[in-house]
Amino acid sequence: CSDIGQHRVPFIFANFNGTKGDVEVFTHEMGHAYQCYMSRDAFPIDTWWPTAEAAEIHSMGLEYLTWPHMELFFGEDGEADRFRRIHLSDALMFLPYGVAVDHFQHLVYANPSATPSERHAMWQEVEELYLPGRDYGDLERCAMGAFWQRQPHIYKYPFYYIDYTLALACALQFWVLSRKDLESTMKVYGDLCRLGGSAPFQELVASAGLRSPFDAGCLEEVVRQARAFLDA
């Protein structure tokens, strides 16, 4: 998702290959587009988009706010419910991985002269801390600590990955709120989108009535509802 500034409209380029990833990416990028559209009258133009740590709240948030419409993508034969369960499970499992990627980058940048084997050891260290249940079986290169090399953000967008975990902590709160009252949650979401980049992360989060990801226990209600949803 980008924007066509002179026309004050967002633009999405997307490919589709018939997988659930199509739906996840499309609703995600639509969140970016909707936010851009809602803040298109903001001045100065630099505030059309939020700063990096807030930008993914709108995209990840819309992934969950569109849940009631998943039958339009998947039909009425139960595939939509299957998608919802996988989507939520994947989100919960992503949180420790996202934090592991960020922690790893801090170790790498604090030790710029580290050898390849030392960097692999750093990844094994954070895996043991955040992802202790991982077992790569006979995938020798991954088992030796090289799994981090599959994550392009580490090479292309240093220290951006933590923004996904911060945003997901907020998006999952939107999911909880939408289950209670979708209409009012959509209004709050729209108001947040309209703010664009006019405020820093903590202020944007507070404006939507969300708990900051930096506050202890911010995901207690999310985890409680997720457990009930997945156990049902």
Image (cartoon, rainbow, N blue to C red):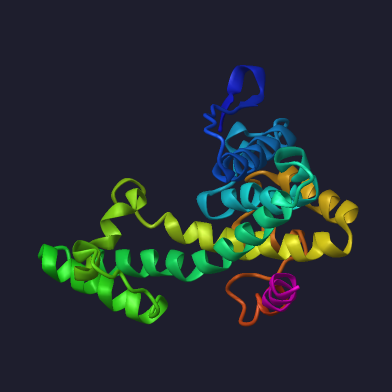
Give the residue displayed 33% in from the left and 74% down from the top.
135
Q: Is residue 91 above or below residue 160?
A: below
Give the residue displayed 71% in from the left and 54% down from the top.
64
Give the residue displayed 77% in from the left and 44% down from the top.
71
Secondary structure mostly taken by the magenta-highlighted segment of the chain: helix
Q: Nearer the viewer, residue 192 or 94?
A: 94
Q: Residue furthest top?
A: 6
Give the residue displayed 76% in from the left and 59% down from the top.
208
Q: Residue furthest front?
A: 77
Residue 126 appears at what percent x and percent y? 33, 75
Residue 214 appears at what percent x and percent y? 58, 74
Left or right, 13 with reference to 224: left
Check if residue 231 falls in the magenta segment.
Answer: yes
Residue 97 appears at what percent x and percent y? 43, 67
Residue 124 appears at what percent x and percent y? 26, 74
Q: Nearer the viewer, residue 60 or 14?
A: 14
Task: Point out the image quarter for the C terminus.
Answer: bottom right
Q: Is residue 192 above or below residue 39?
A: below
Left or right, 141 with reference to 192: left
Left or right, 50 with reference to 70: left
Which segment did they paint magenta? 223-232
Check if residue 192 falls in the magenta segment.
Answer: no
Task: Point out the image quarter for the N terminus.
Answer: top right
Q: Is residue 210 above or below residue 70?
A: below
